Amino acid sequence: MPERVYDLEDRLVDFAISIIDIVEGLPNGRATNHIASQLIRSGTSPAPNYSESMSAESKQDFIHKIKIALKELRESRVWMKIIIRRRYLQKDNEAVSAINECEELIRILSASVKTASKGK
């Protein structure tokens, strides 16, 4: 059996898909429509930003793009906390799993920024 290659971009794409699923499960309403539009934007943004960082023109450009992805992940985490605390979903386990994955992605990307920033 071949060893599975770790692909952060695929993991970020899977995170975006989980965000889409969460948003599509929200009830219709003024507040939830606002939250949905904010979460869909912030939750789907990290994957393309990370992808762009792979072709960065400089170390500073790489760090900048990763920091944008981090900012969007942190925003997504807050929107999901609001969804859970407000009990907008029938089953919170999908949002809880997404928050856990978001936390791990934040740690990974933060470590990337720290490593890339060494020797600047």
Image (cartoon, rainbow, N blue to C red):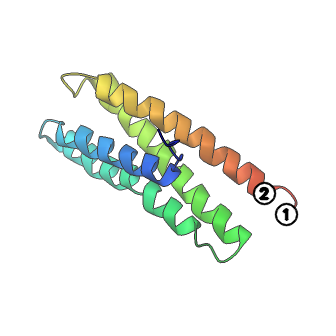
Most extreme residue toward the right, as rendered?
A: 119
Q: What amino acid type is highlighted by mark number 2?
A: Ser
Viewport quadrant of the C terminus: bottom right
Query: For mark 2, what is the residue?
Result: 117
Q: Amino acid at mark 1?
A: Lys
Question: Can residue 46 be seen here?
Answer: yes
Quarter location, residue 81? top left
Residue at left offset 44%, top offset 62%: 48
- Neighbourhood count class around disc 2 (C-alpha, 10 Å): few under 14, some 14–19, many 20 upward: few
Residue at the bottom extreme, as displayed? 57
Q: In the image shown, does 112 or 24 lie closer to the viewer? A: 112
Name the residue rendered at 35%, 48% in the picture.
Answer: 16
* 110 up-or-down from 90: above or below: below
Q: Report x, y in % for residue 33.
A: 20, 46
Report the front residue among 81 and 102: 102
Q: Which mark is residue 35?
A: none
Q: Secondary structure at mark 2?
A: helix
SS of the residue under disc 1: loop
Image location (x, y in percent) of residue 75: 46, 45
- Residue that carries the numbered disc 1 in the rendered image: 120
Residue 89, percent across and down? 21, 27
